[in-house]
Image: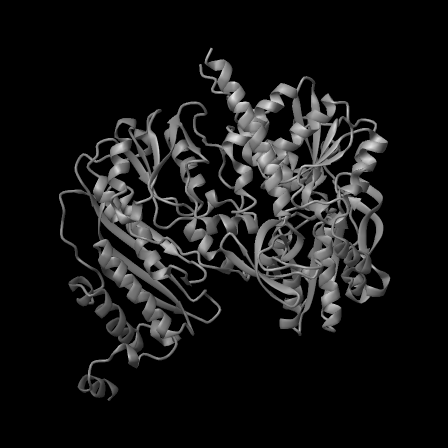
Amino acid sequence: MNRQRLARSRPLAIEDLPDVVQIAQGSGGKLTHQLIETLFVPLFDNPYLKALGDQAILDPSTERMALSTDAFVVKPYIFPGGNIGDLAVNGTVNDLLMGGATPAYLTASFILEEGLPTKELVFIVESMAIAAKKAGVQIVAGDTKVVERGAADGLYITTTGVGFVPKGLQWSPAQIRAGDAVIVSGTVGDHGASVLAHRFGIDFESQIQSDTACLRDVVMAVRDLPGIRCMRDPTRGGLATTVQELSQASGLNLRIRETSMAIQEDVRGICEVLGLDALYLASEGKLVAVVAPEEADECLRIMRTVQESKDAAVIGEVTDDIPGFASLETYIGAVRVLDLLSLEQLPRIC
Amino acid sequence: MKFVDEYRDPAAARYLLEQIHKLCDAPQRIMEICGGHTHSIVRSGMEQVLPEAIKFVHGPGCPVCVTPIAKIDQAIALARRPRTIIATYGDMVRVPGSSSSLLQEKAKGAHVKIVYSSLDAVRLAVENPDSEVVFFAVGFETTIPANGFSVIRAKQLGLTNFSMLSNHVLVPPVIRAVLDDPGVRIDAFLGPGHVSTIVGSQDYEFIPREYHRPVVISGFEPNDILESLFMILKQRREGRCEVEVQYSRAVTKYGNPRAQDVVKEVFSPVEQEWRGIGAIAESGLSLRKELRAFDAYYKFHDWMPLPRPEEPCECICGEITRGVKEPRECASFGTGCTPERPLGACMVSSEGTCAAYYRYQHVTIQTGGARD
Amino acid sequence: MCLAVPAEVLDIDGSTALVDMAGVKRRICIDLLDEVHPGDYVLVHVGFALQIIDAQEAQETLELLRACFQEDLHAAAAPSTE
């Protein structure tokens, strides 16, 4: 009965969705279909998704394929400068790009908490669509589940991405050599700082914006330079963790300089106030590139022509002094080891 | 950042280091009392660029390190009480008691809230009238007035669901205890800058007068500390022994009298147990008798666990904190005791002596541009 | 024990003040101080102003240090030319 009536009426629109997410929307029944057809299909808008099959069947490629997946659980899910939606697209796209891959397809899996305002869900899905378009990827498959109120923090999104790596490109920490330059594409710690106050429920007013951004333009601009050894985006664990991981993987020492690094004034401010170290705060739209010394200047010059990396700078060099460890040259001229954090940073008073 | 960046100027740091190298002609063991100084020293890698003759002895000025296990156990016991919110500073949530930590209790369902300010704890009590809010308040002279003020505010608001589990400690008595140790090897003190904004520089005058050690009260930026070291060396060179203030932009002789009044209004001196050091007479503050309605220890006395024996391991934290021994001399160091699973106080806080040593134990960095 | 940061007082309302700590704003308690004015820099610890920073003293001590340091630079520069 109902189906007949639906079929005859005008196509459902977002306004017809219930005000808040309901358990039935994840049950696979009519409400699930309604959600997919009114929200995801029109916004993500591509033939693969429109087919509404159990899978997307993609065209073959002669290039090597890169595959990456990431779960996003950020709190709060809408934060200054972005939201979990663009983060989930940019995060996975950037992970593909760090291997030199051209990102092509994404899948998106949603875990929604019962009671999530539909308006916010729509806003987030719209942001994903915009981010995907900007990144040049299509969201070709997805899944939606709804859990009971209290069982999730608003919503979680998992994205999986496929990209293609051009022949001959072999970026990896194993390529790093002593003497290489370490470049970072801009200020660090912005995203981590933007969610800090919220995360600890501490009442601060700040204008700090997350730097969530797609790094496609940056990577594409410099990808043809043969001197690029490898790239990595300093997300979780921040710049310090990334240079430590690269040091460990290469068996060399990435030595960065405190005086060369750009950290935004208010990011530093909140770190001073809460007693945290910005070098361990996540960036979501920055990359670290290790580049052969003779190409460092050229790489920097090109990067600075791209909006997302206009503040790129050489922040250090690779040495073979302390194999397997990253280090920081402090501005008083000392060099100390940059270790992985053994525990999560918490605000402190002492 | 104004009043911060000016003290991170590399050129000024180089100048101060040169002066220090020129002046330093004999071994100097300098105790920085405050954990904030330890943090700055470790973070900037200062020991590498100082003359080898200068050795920092990390003092007892870190509330995380000196809060006794029994007190942590009390906070944990209260966290397990139904309808109770434990509000505390981020520093305290990871400190291990005898069998758990507040963070572990939180994972099991306890309501543990990290607060930025003591008044945030009061606000929690206002917002949660059906719960008891226990403010697990720790601190030295810097923090004590702010913590005390929360009790005044709670009293003004007529709150009956706010109480304080107090572990407040004082600098001068513990310095005396350190200096009275016959094994002590400390030549001078870097005085705690922020404690001194409250108490004033006069509080340390007994150190040169009775113990003949110079004190320079220092700011917290690396250049502040370098300048203070320079001032200590200069005192030695000129044969002076006195209290000097490098952190003159914030420290006066008499400190902050209003803050001192708040402390007197709310607290009274008691014997205090220091983790790794032991009990010291009149070295702590607890809530005054007439404020016992706000004292969680009395209010929930039935919930308080029996104290267990302290430091059951072969830990030598006490000797390390007094500067008598070094971490490597401890049998548990790096084996039974690590930052992830600390046994002793010095490994608990990231700025504890053992934790700082642990981070660097596997690496020796060449300094001064040495190459092979 | 001692994480305190310099903050500029923007606005005062009774016993609280809105302060700016390098772009991060928060209302803090100023009841531990006798008198504070907008434009003052205060040291903030756990949401309380502990002390007013003596800007003149700060500048004088910095200048003193800079003067020594300039003198030293000149002194160092002179013999190196011989």
Considering depth in this image, is A24 or A116 the residue closer to the camera? A116
Q: Can residue B160 be spotted in the picture?
A: no
**Residue for point 51% across, 35% down:** B9
Considering depth in this image, is A59 or B61 the residue closer to the camera? B61
Residue A18: x percent and y percent?
35, 80
Residue B6: x percent and y percent?
54, 40
Q: Is residue A299 above or below residue C12?
A: above
B261 horizontally vs B101: left or right: right
**Residue for point 49% across, 69% down:** A150
Residue B149: x percent and y percent?
72, 61
Residue A152: x percent and y percent?
45, 65
Considering depth in this image, is B119 or A15 the residue closer to the camera? B119
Q: Is residue A198 above or below residue A232?
A: below
The quadrant where residue B31 appears:
top right
Q: Can residue A167 be spotted in the picture?
A: yes
The quadrant where residue A170 appears:
top left
